[in-house]
Amino acid sequence: VVLSLVLFAQDWELSKDENNIRVYKGKSDSSRYNVIKVEAEMQGTLKKLINILKDVSNNKNWVYNTKQSHLVKEINDNEFLYYAETRLPWPFSNRDMVIRMHFDLDTLRNNLKIKATGEPGAVPEVDNKVRIQKFYGDWDVKYDGVNKITIVYFLELNPGGNISPGISNLFVTKGPF
């Protein structure tokens, strides 16, 4: 699936470049919603990043507009399912999603690959929320062996409901930054 993201979004447009974080948007061949690529460099380690991402109940403190999130099921040390609700302004309904996150840590190469895929049917839908049916995130993280990580992140999603691609595409780079 990562290959398809790269293939249908070859022409990336830089949307924001600040604090060693670059956010790009690209056109999708399979959807009218833009795909996102984020390139970032920051202090940290692969283990620290994994611990932050596994602490899903804390997402509301750092993931854009997260109202709530919680662990649904831990599959093993490298994979889990979690639920997240995203707050949207009126007149839109909040969105929710269930995400399967899988970590592939290669300590010999100081590399971490993360796949995040939506599993909309993993838990029952919630009244007054629009379930995101299509979500795919891909992370490629490299560690310098000292205290710096370099992240390349791709995101493709369809927010569903009554949010048109034109409206969504205006704001899609705000969240990843």
Image: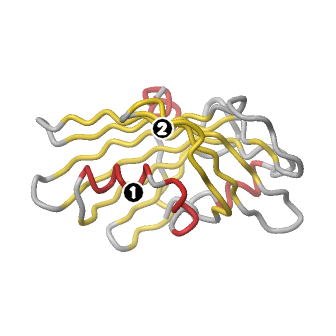
Q: Residues within 10 Å of mark 2 (few under 14, many from 20)?
A: many
* Image x and y of residue 37, in percent: 46, 49
| Relative side of 44 to 39, left or right | left
| Residue drawn at x 68%, y 63% as measured from the top left | 67
* Mark 1, residue position: 52
Q: Which mark is residue 167?
A: none
| Residue drawn at x 49%, y 36% as measured from the top left | 74
Specify which label sits upstream in the sequence, 2 or 1.
Answer: 1
| Relative side of 123 to 105, left or right | right
* Image x and y of residue 138, in percent: 44, 39
Q: How is the image coloured?
A: secondary structure
Looking at the image, do the residues carrying marks 2 and 1 touch, with CB atoms under 8 Å apart? no
Residue 136 sits above or below residue 95 on the image: above
Q: Indicate the amino acid at tag 1.
A: Ile
Callout 1: SS: helix
Callout 2: SS: strand
Q: Residue furthest bottom?
A: 19
Residue 85 sits above or below residue 16 on the image: above
- Nearer to the camera, 134 or 25: 134
* Image x and y of residue 8, in percent: 53, 32
* Image x and y of residue 98, in percent: 64, 40
| Residue drawn at x 60%, y 40% as measured from the top left | 72
* Mark 2, residue position: 101
Rounded to the nearest whole Å, what is the CA distance between mark 2 and mark 1? Answer: 13 Å
- Nearer to the camera, 91 or 6: 91
Q: Residues within 10 Å of mark 1 (few under 14, many from 20)?
A: few
- Nearer to the camera, 117 or 124: 124
| Residue drawn at x 33%, y 54% as measured from the top left | 49
Q: Indicate the amino acid at tag 2.
A: Met
